[in-house]
Image (spheres, rainbow, N blue to C red):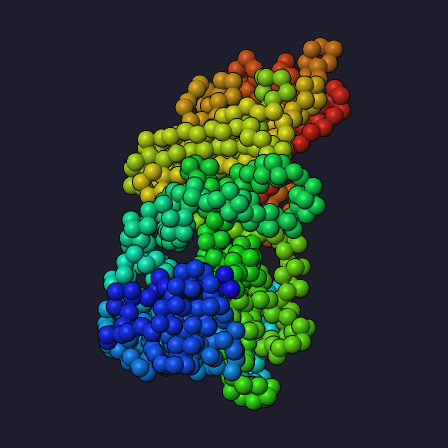
């Protein structure tokens, strides 16, 4: 009973102490004794005294207080009794707003306590409307009516009614047709099969009906904020309303207002972070999430930062994660987030922001406070945590003919949600009308399921194969630049010279000069297979720079020396003016060029090769090379081929003796490589000393590591993709090496 008394005292906070009674009231002796018992936390005695007062005098204050105490116990029996005493209080003092507020709240609680009370929720809304007729400034009535209308909006927005007729769903079929390119073919076939089993769906409401619910809910919630600006619940409810209607930007000023009122409030910071994230304010979102975490208690912070990540990683790491001690597990999780950051150029981790936002969204929309259920721990919450919001989310309710066919009342029908992704879909059901949607599972047997899909088992199978899905969200637009990498033997022992070249085409609408007017940042980041960062190169350029290929295209080359290894590499550009982003993260193998083994470098397809040193080019010995990283050439562009041969053996005359064969094949779209089109035997090369020589397919030289380059004319070839293969045979040792490159040729 102590718990009941504490909850009762909490309920008192929502009353009007200064204006509880609309008429002069004399309290009975029993009433006063009951209040004293409550102050002493003796709830049993308080209940007895209130009941005695009601028996003797049927006084409204005792009916009201007695009903409040009964309503703390949310059982159907207690609530039914509480509503009777609450009615008595209202009948005796019909202008008393707190009495009416309590009656409306008990009606609502009774609705959720049993399926037998389906009319009580509507009665609660009518009660709030009566209160507002009496006092249009009553914040509590505005809040509760706005909240109920918001629940109706969430229930009917994107909702269809399910009918028993075995025809396909026209709305979903239209959606599949519109979104077809973004859905994998196997899923399209699966969904079409799904259509044939679920029956016919038709839209449940006209768009204006849902819009009217939105407008009414918005009006009442904004009124609640106006008349009681310090009550944070109104802000959260209206934020949900705006977010679900794709109007997150309208929630921003309200949450900023709440943040100024409730400073140092973790929930306000968390949901303000979510709203910033939804409107692409990543940097501000990161700041607000950090503020929230600073206000978390130790256990709450541990769960938010690491508990949620352990759930995410469990299918991937399984027993490995369980065997780690807490410190080791935390280090592993931190390393996971670091290596999954899609943009190292920003001071925050976009993937981690997405994770935090998925948690915040789940907690805002999927929590069930009355049942102490945290949103991210629900079935929908875990699905969102792993795969983000679906491409489409549609809610279904059963139609009257299906209810008749299944011999059930409409109010007993489960509400279902279908979440459709590009490569999977899941069905959830609210079996007990308590807002806790669980995976659809017709094998449970205790409820008539709307769908014959076992999403519970499907989810378990999918997460074993695909534990997460994520597409980066940046503050600015995304753009593309062609880039390529080239590897050469380094003069430094057991190292490789790596060059990365990228072009910025200012004629492209996504990379116009004005977008770069404030400069841009470039990043090249490398991790080894153990997750250790071995390279972190960052450069800032005030304007578009590089070797000017023509009037609109600029080429840049970056040079680094690395130890041979398998690595993870990230190449990123970010404009300062609009935060536009190019980011490519990929697995990469840094080749080992051995000291005494015949080998060949990357084949470099270039726009120009000249003697001397020129900035923003690849400089190899005395040659400045301007690569064309997209490998696209036309008969208007010069095409130079450059590569290096290493460790040629010398004969007794101190000369190398090797054969070189350059072969070009056209790549057929369906059958792959076609017939050999040409062999290039006469090429122009340059030795270490810089002397120009004419090389044939079989030649000798003084240089063990010659640089080879030549200009090629493909003017007689038709447009298409070609593969160039260079084969080197050392005639002294009879050893061979080769390398390939791909050329896209446009014969204009």
Q: Position of residue 166 (x, y in %)?
A: 58, 84
Q: Is residue 49 visible?
A: yes
Residue drawn at x 46%, y 45% as measured from the top left:
296
Residue drawn at x 49%, y 75% as measured from the top left:
78
In the visual, does 445 lie left or right of 688? Answer: right
Q: Position of residue 598 (x, y in %)?
A: 69, 23
Marker count (numbered): 0
Q: Position of residue 112 (x, y in %)?
A: 49, 74
Residue drawn at x 45%, y 51% as measured from the top left:
357
Query: Looking at the image, which is closer to me, 264 or 465?
Result: 264
Query: Looking at the image, which is closer to me, 264 or 497?
Result: 264
Q: Is residue 624 above or below residue 243?
A: above
Residue 459 image-quadrant placement:
bottom right
Residue 58 image-quadrant placement:
bottom left
In the visual, does 185 lie left or right of 25? Answer: right
Q: Is residue 101 visible?
A: no
In the visual, does 703 lie left or right of 479? Answer: right
Residue drawn at x 74%, y 10% as measured from the top left:
652
In the visual, does 305 lie left or right of 590? Answer: left
Residue 616 image-quadrant placement:
top left
Taking the view exactly as shown, the residue that stands out farthest to the front is: 29
Q: Position of residue 731 (x, y in %)?
A: 73, 22
Taking the view exactly as shown, the residue that stands out farthest to the right is: 734
Q: Is residue 28 above or below residue 226?
A: below
């Amino acid at each position: 009973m102590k718990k009941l008394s504490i909850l009762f005292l909490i309920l008192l906070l929502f009353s009007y102490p200064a204006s509880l009674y609309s008429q002069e009231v004399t309290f009975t002796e029993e009433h006063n004794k009951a209040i004293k018992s409550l102050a002493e936390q003796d709830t049993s005695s308080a209940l007895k005294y209130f009941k005695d007062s009601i028996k003797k005098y049927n006084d409204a204050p005792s009916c009201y207080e007695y009903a409040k105490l009964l309503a703390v116990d949310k059982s159907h029996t207690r609530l039914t009794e509480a509503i009777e005493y609450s009615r008595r209080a209202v009948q005796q003092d019909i202008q008393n707003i707190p009495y009416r507020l309590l009656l409306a709240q008990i009606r609502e609680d009774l609705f959720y306590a049993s399926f037998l009370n389906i009319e009580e929720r509507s009665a609660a809304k009518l009660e709030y409307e009566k209160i507002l007729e009496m006092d249009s400034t009553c914040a509590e009535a505005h809040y509760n009516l706005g909240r109920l209308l918001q629940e109706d909006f969430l229930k009917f927005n994107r909702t269809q009614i399910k009918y028993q007729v075995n025809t396909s769903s026209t709305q979903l079929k239209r959606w599949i047709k519109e979104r077809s390119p973004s859905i994998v073919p196997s899923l399209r076939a699966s969904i079409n099969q799904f259509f044939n089993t679920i029956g016919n769906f038709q839209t449940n409401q006209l768009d204006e009906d849902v819009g009217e619910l939105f407008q009414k809910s918005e009006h009442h919630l904004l009124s609640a904020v106006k008349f009681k600006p310090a009550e944070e619940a109104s802000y959260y409810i209206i934020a949900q309303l705006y977010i679900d209607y794709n109007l997150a930007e309208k929630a921003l000023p309200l949450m900023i207002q709440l943040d100024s009122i409730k400073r140092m409030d973790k929930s306000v910071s968390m949901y303000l972070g979510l709203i910033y994230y939804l409107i692409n304010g990543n940097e501000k979102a990161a700041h607000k999430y950090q503020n929230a975490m600073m206000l978390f208690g130790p256990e709450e912070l541990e769960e938010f930062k690491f508990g949620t990540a352990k759930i995410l990683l469990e299918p991937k790491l399984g027993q490995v994660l369980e065997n780690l001690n807490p410190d080791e597990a935390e280090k592993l999780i931190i390393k996971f987030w670091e290596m999954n950051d899609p943009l190292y150029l920003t001071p925050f981790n976009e993937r981690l922001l997405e994770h935090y936002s998925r948690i915040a969204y789940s907690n805002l929309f999927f929590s069930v406070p009355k049942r102490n259920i945290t949103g991210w721990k629900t079935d929908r919450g875990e699905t969102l945590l792993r795969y983000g919001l679906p491409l489409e989310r549609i809610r279904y309710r059963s139609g009257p003919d299906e209810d008749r066919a299944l011999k059930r009342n409409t109010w007993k029908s489960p509400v279902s949600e279908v979440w459709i992704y590009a490569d999977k879909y899941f069905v959830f059901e609210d079996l007990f009308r308590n807002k806790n949607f669980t995976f659809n599972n017709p094998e449970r047997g205790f409820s008539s399921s709307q769908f014959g899909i076992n999403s519970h088992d499907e989810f378990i199978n999918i997460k074993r194969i695909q534990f997460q899905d994520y597409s980066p969200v940046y503050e600015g637009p995304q753009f593309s630049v062609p880039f390529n990498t080239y590897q050469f033997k380094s003069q430094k022992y057991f190292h490789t010279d790596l060059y990365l070249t990228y072009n910025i085409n200012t004629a492209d609408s996504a990379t116009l000069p004005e977008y770069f007017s404030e400069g841009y940042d470039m990043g090249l980041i490398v991790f080894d297979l153990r997750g250790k960062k071995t390279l972190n190169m960052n450069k800032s350029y005030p304007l578009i720079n590089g070797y000017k290929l023509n009037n609109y295209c600029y080429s840049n080359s970056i040079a680094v020396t690395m130890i041979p290894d398998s690595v993870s590499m990230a190449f990123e550009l970010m404009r300062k003016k609009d935060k536009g982003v190019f980011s490519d993260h990929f697995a990469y193998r840094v080749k080992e060029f051995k000291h005494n083994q015949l080998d060949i470098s990357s084949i470099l397809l270039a726009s120009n090769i000249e003697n001397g040193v020129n900035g923003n080019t690849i400089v190899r010995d005395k040659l400045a090379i301007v690569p064309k990283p997209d490998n696209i050439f036309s008969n208007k562009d010069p095409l130079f081929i450059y590569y290096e041969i290493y460790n040629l053996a010398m004969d007794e005359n101190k000369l190398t003796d090797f054969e070189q064969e350059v072969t070009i094949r056209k790549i057929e779209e369906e059958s792959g490589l076609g017939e050999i089109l040409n062999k290039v035997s006469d090429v122009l090369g340059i030795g270490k000393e810089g002397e120009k020589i004419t090389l044939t397919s079989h030649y000798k030289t003084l240089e063990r590591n010659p640089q080879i380059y030549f200009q090629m004319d493909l003017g007689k070839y038709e447009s298409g993709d070609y593969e160039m293969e260079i084969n080197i045979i050392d005639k002294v040792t009879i050893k061979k090496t080769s390398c390939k490159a791909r050329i896209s040729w446009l014969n204009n």
